[in-house]
Structure formats: C-alpha cells, structure tokens
Image (tube, rainbow, N blue to C red):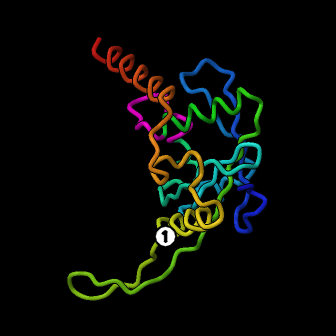
Amino acid sequence: MDISQVKTAVKIGDFTLRNEDSPNHISIKYISSNEDLNSNLPRVYIITSNGEIKKIGGSSAIGGIKATMNFYINARTGSPGPSRFIIHELIRRELEQNKKVELFVIASSSIKARVPGLFGYHIIDILSSKEMEKVCKDDFYQSEKRYPDWNFQENNEPYHSRYKDIYNEYLQYHKHRISK
C-alpha cells in the first residue's frame, strides 16, 4: 500500500545513513517541531520505503515519537531485541539502495475515562495507542490481504535468515566484548 492512500498520517521525518563513526548506521532528520516530536500522546508510526508502507507500529512511550524511534535508531548498541535490530538493518539496506525511507505518524488525543481505584473512581487520561495500532493494521490487512512486509509477527513470518545471522553475530560480539 502506498502512503498516499493514508488520509490520517503526517510525515515527520526522513531516515538517513549516518556518516559519523557509530555502531548505528541510521538516523532521522525530523521535520516537525520538538513539541510534536516529544508529545506523550498515543501514536501510530508508519515507516515507508519509496512510498510503500513497510512497518506499522504503535507507542505511548514517554518522550514521544523521538523516544519511540530511538529504539530503532540505536538498535546496534546495548542489548536490542531482534525486531528493532532487524528493522534497523532493513532501513539501512533500503537507504544503501538509494530508496527514500520516511517516517509518518498518526497521533490521537487522550481520552478521559472514569476508572475504578481501590477507594472510588478517578477521571484519568487513557492513551489508546494499542487500539489505534490494531485499527491501522486491520485497515491495511483489509486492503492488502496481509500486513506490511516488516510486520513479521503479524504475518506469522520468520525474520529473513540474513538478518537473523547479522543479529546473532552482533549478540556474540557484544557478549564477548562485555565479558572482557
């Protein structure tokens, strides 16, 4: 599905290859204000390559979309999970093939709800990123009869063996480096 078909998403940045000496290979050039990027409102993010939707995810992480994307941008440091590490590598591959990789966001306001506590009810803000993410993925599925290519779990597909191997090599190297 092409991102131009999506009516609710706003482009907020372009992924780029890093030029500096860093274990991480990608970065993002944001085009939105810091206020928008750091907003704690629930959000769905969409990663595209040459306009094609490759990944749909959701987050309510404190620190906004910048905090959410830091998991992908810095996936080659520390002990990343396979999903974020492999998405980092897939973005890198697309960029090395001179494809335009962009980041879009669908944000929602919080919803006030009456929630029971131990001694009574409280009116609190509910963040609906999981529900938004599910609706977006379901819409995509209804249109395409599958989920985006990089939504491996939803498609019940294994990670590409090439990227699993790169991830396992990284883990072995990182484990060896820490044990010294």
Q: Quadrant of the C terminus?
A: top left
Instruction: Tell me residue 108's x, y (percent).
Output: 59, 70
Residue extent of the magenta highlight: 71-83
Residue drawn at 71 percent across, 46 percent down: 102
The vertical placement of 20 against 143, above or below, is above
Tell me the amino acid under the disc marked 1: Glu
Relative placement, left or right, of 38 versus 123 is right
Element carrying mark 1:
helix
Is residue 82 magenta-colored?
yes
Is residue 39 magenta-colored?
no
- Determine which quarter of the picture holds residue 121: bottom left
Residue drawn at 55 percent across, 69 percent down: 135
Q: Is residue 41 visible?
A: no
- Determine which quarter of the picture holds residue 175: top left
The vertical placement of 121 against 41, above or below, is below
Q: Which residue matches tag 1?
A: 131
Q: Is residue 138 visible?
A: yes
Relative placement, left or right, of 59 versus 180 is right
